[in-house]
Image: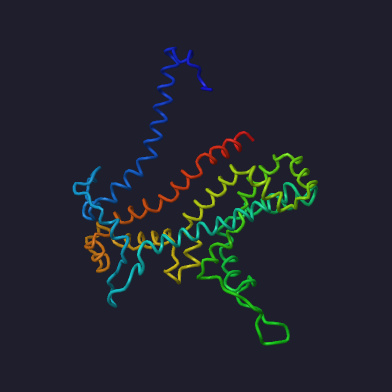
Amino acid sequence: MPVIPEVGRRDVRMKIILLGIAAVLWLGVIIHLAPIFWMFVTSIKPTAEVFRFPPTLWPENPTFDPYRLLTRTLNQVGGGGSTALFRYPMWTYLFNSVLLAFGTVAFEVPITALAAYGVAKLLRGRAARVLFLFFIGTLMIPGQVALIPRFLLLSHFPWPTMSVPHIPFSESFFPSYSFVGTYWGVILPAAFNAFNFLLFTGYFATIPSEFIDAARIDGATEMQIFQRIALPLSRPIIAVCVYFTFTATWNSFLWPLIVLMGDQSKWPLSVMMYKLQYFLTNWQPAQGTMDPAMQQMVESGVGFNALMALAILESIPVFIMFLIFREQLMKGIRLQGFK
């Protein structure tokens, strides 16, 4: 049902109001699409035209060389000779991002949903309140505060200390394992998300307890109830949590940079973009000089146009995930809004 009936739209004042609302909405659309348009235009400009002032709204000689260059390795020339800036093609970094994103989703969503189901439907009274506050309390701790303890824990798991302790009355160390430099070092710390836990708990609380009690009378186990009743009824919230988790992991930069810094073969696209941006910003056109590494990059056609091309390619999977979960996302957002 429309907010304004058809009869009311015939009034002149109402038409003016509707035109004003439409103008504001279209202005918002243009403001949001302008950066995307500028990214695409910059990505198809030649390197020399990127630095031209005043800038051009459309390239005079469009080229897709930056997209082709991203599929090859990029080299830099320094005082010690030629070394690889990126030793692997872009598809290697793309595969790493996909693996980390889907791996995090595969661990985080089921674990968070199980915790939320236990708090919402299995526990009662003080135990449920204490556990709920404990999980939600992690939202009060900034992620940057936990970086060092988390890194120490993963460096020689399960000991969150500077070094592995000795076994009492011996010179041997306790067993430990290092997740630093591995995919697990990125995935495991994200195995639980307090915000998604809050969403799941609120939604599971709305499921009628009669459904669960009837399943228990029929002999179903709690895991069967969770799989066959709770999860099918929670598809909108699952879609919201999957999309949020995928997007956050796909765009995550700081933690993968810390854990995977020593092994370039495991870098995601976000870290690759940072390294390329850092290398490009080492030279400023106003300085009038260019180091040999930057000179080689510019001569090969790799500059900020390649960085914009990489940014566009990185945003495509997020857009695809939105198209896949669009219907369920809208349902989940509406449900949370009504609550």
Q: Quadrant of the N terminus?
A: top right
Left or right, 78 with respect to 99, comes to left
- Rendering quarter of residue 336: top right
- The correct choice, above or below, for 332 with respect to 80 in the image is above
Residue 230 pos. (x, y %): 67, 46
Left or right, 124 with respect to 93, comes to right
The residue positioned farthest toward the left in the image shown: 60
Residue 97 pos. (x, y %): 45, 59
Q: Quadrant of the C terminus?
A: top right
Who's the residue at 65% across and 51% down the image?
Answer: 113
Who's the residue at 74% across and 41% down the image?
Answer: 211
Tell me which colouring the rendered structure shows.
Answer: rainbow
Left or right, 24 with respect to 54, comes to right
Who's the residue at 23% across and 52% down the image?
Answer: 63
Residue 91 pos. (x, y %): 38, 61
Depth order, front residue of 61/169: 61
Left or right, 260 with respect to 27, comes to right
The residue positioned farthest toward the front in the image shown: 218
Depth order, front residue of 123/296: 123
- Rendering quarter of residue 162: bottom right
Marks counted in the figure total 0
Depth order, front residue of 136/249: 249
Residue 51 visible in the current orientation: no
Residue 258 visible in the current orientation: yes
